[in-house]
Image (tube, helix red, strand yellow):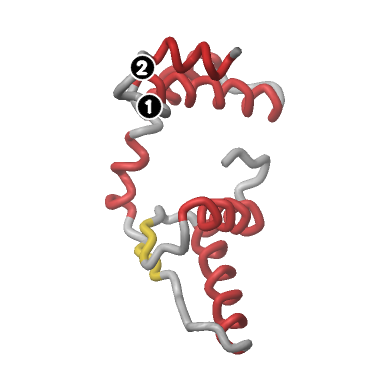
C-alpha cells in the first residue's frame, strides 16, 4: 500500500485493508518498524473492545524479527533495481502510478495473474489494458 507517511495511521490502514481481503491472521511477522508495531497494537486494541461487547477474544500475535521478514523483502529487489537509476520521484502520484505498473509487470512475469496456467502473460496484460 502506498502512503505519503509511514506512521501508525498508514500502517493501521494497510493492515485493515489486508485483513479485509485475506481474513484475520493468527500470527504476523514484521520488521523492526515502529509504525507496523503501533498499527498491529491498535488493531489488537480494537479486537479487545469487540470482546468487551460480546465477541470472541482474538488477538494477532506479532513476531518482530528482522531476518524472518527477509523472504518478503526479497520480492522488492526487482522494484528497487528499476527505481534506483531514476533517483526517486518528484511527486507521490507519479510514484504510485510507476510502482503499480512495475508490480503488474512482475506479477505477470511470475505467473501470478488470473488463469496463469491457461493464458500467456501478454494475453492477460492486453485483457487488463483493454
- Whole-Å distance between the Cαs marked 1 and 2? 6 Å
For residue 105, side relative to residue 50 (left or right): left
| Residue 117 on image: x %, y % | 30, 24
In depth, the one of 51 and 97 nearer the eye is: 51
The location of residue 6, given as percent across then percent down, is: 60, 48
Using the image as rendered, state which of residue 40 and residue 119 is in the foreground: 119
Please tell me which residue is depicted at 43% across the width and 70% down the height of the picture. Answer: 60
Question: Mark 1 falls on what kind of element?
Answer: loop
Q: In this view, does 59 lie to the left or right of 51?
A: left
Q: Mark 1 points at which residue?
A: 115
State the residue at coordinates (44%, 25%): 80
Q: Tell me what residue is drawn at x 28 percent, y 50 percent.
A: 67
Image quadrant holding the C terminus, namely top right
Q: Nearer the viewer, residue 121 or 40?
A: 121
Residue in the image at 67% along x and 40% along y? 4
Q: Residue 56 in the image: state x and y as whole percent.
A: 49, 83
Q: How many marks on residues?
A: 2
Q: What element carries label 2?
A: loop
Residue 70 to residue 8: above or below: above
Q: Where, quadrant-wise, is the N terminus in this rendering?
A: top right
> Horizontally, is 67 left or right of 104 in the view?
left
Label 1 close to label 2 by CB (< 8 Å): yes
**Which residue is labeled 2 in the image?**
119
**Displayed quadrant of residue 65:** bottom left
Q: Could you classify mark 2 by the number of other residues whose Cα lies within 10 Å: few (under 14), some (14-19), or many (20 or more)? A: few
Amino acid at each position: 500500500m502506498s502512503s505519503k507517511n509511514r506512521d501508525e495511521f498508514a500502517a493501521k490502514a494497510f493492515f485493515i485493508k489486508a485483513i479485509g481481503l485475506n481474513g484475520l491472521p493468527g500470527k504476523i511477522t514484521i520488521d523492526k518498524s515502529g509504525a507496523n508495531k503501533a498499527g498491529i497494537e491498535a488493531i489488537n486494541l480494537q479486537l479487545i473492545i469487540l470482546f468487551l461487547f460480546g465477541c470472541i477474544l482474538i488477538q494477532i500475535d506479532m513476531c518482530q524479527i528482522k531476518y524472518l521478514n527477509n523472504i518478503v523483502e526479497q520480492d522488492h529487489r526487482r522494484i528497487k533495481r528499476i527505481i534506483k537509476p531514476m533517483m526517486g520521484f518528484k511527486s507521490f502520484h507519479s510514484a504510485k502510478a510507476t510502482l503499480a505498473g512495475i508490480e503488474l509487470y512482475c506479477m505477470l512475469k511470475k505467473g501470478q495473474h488470473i488463469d496463469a496456467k491457461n493464458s500467456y502473460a501478454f494475453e492477460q496484460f492486453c485483457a487488463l489494458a483493454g
